[in-house]
Amino acid sequence: MKFKVSPNVYSEEMSEKAFSRTLRRIALKRPVTGLFVVTEPIMNTGIMEIYDYNELLQPYYRKNKSTLNILGIAKSRESAKTLVCDIIDDAYRELGGPKIKELFGLSG
């Protein structure tokens, strides 16, 4: 599975250095302790999903040839849930509905 981090990815408060280091580790598919990612749904059921990033490095996901769009990055599952709420709030405010793909400029 390929990872594509959205250019306007949502993240919790972290330093610029820590953020760029995290993005680099994701690009290299390196394990990151305590990292949760908000993604598009893998099986196209639902709006978004939250994964422990290291789970996505397991062989089951590595064999999948699709691209996974990362929409948010957080250090805990609770922070990831907050990011999901923020993304949905922004989608409703800007687009009038739960149009997550349009919010991130992804093809629908």
Image (cartoon, rainbow, N blue to C red):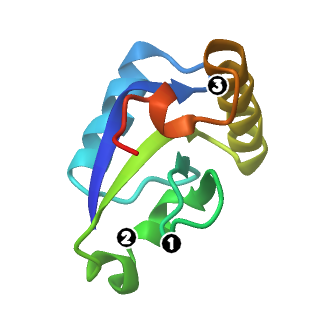
Q: Is residue 9 above or below residue 101?
A: above
Q: Nearer the viewer, mark 2 or mark 3?
A: 3
Look at the numbered disc 2 and give the secondary structure of its residue.
helix
| For marks 1 and 2 on the same chain, the one whose residue lies earlier in the sequence | 1
Q: Is residue 14 above or below residue 39?
A: above
Residue 62 point in image, percent of width and height: 29, 76
| Residues at marks 2 and 3, CA–CA distance in whole angstroms | 29 Å
Rendered image: mark on residue 91: 3
Which amino acid, by three-letter code, is at mark 1? Met
User: Which residue is pictured at 44% across the width and 53% down the height?
Assistant: 32
Between 54 and 72, the one lying in front of the other is 72
Which amino acid, by three-letter code, is at mark 2? Leu
Which amino acid, by three-letter code, is at mark 3? Ala
Where, by quadrant of the figure, is residue 90 drawn?
Answer: top right
Q: Is residue 71 left or right of residue 80?
A: left
Residue 9 point in image, percent of width and height: 45, 28
Crowd class of label 3 (few under 14; some 14 to 19; many from 20; radius 10 Å): some
User: Which residue is pictured at 33% across the width and 84% down the height?
Assistant: 59
Q: Nearer the viewer, mark 1 or mark 2?
A: 1
The residue that disc 1 covers is 43
The residue that disc 2 covers is 57
Q: Is residue 17 above or below residue 100?
A: above
Residue 67 point in image, percent of width and height: 28, 59
Image quarter in which the C terminus is found: top left
Look at the numbered disc 3 and give the secondary structure of its residue.
helix
Rendered image: mark on residue 85: none
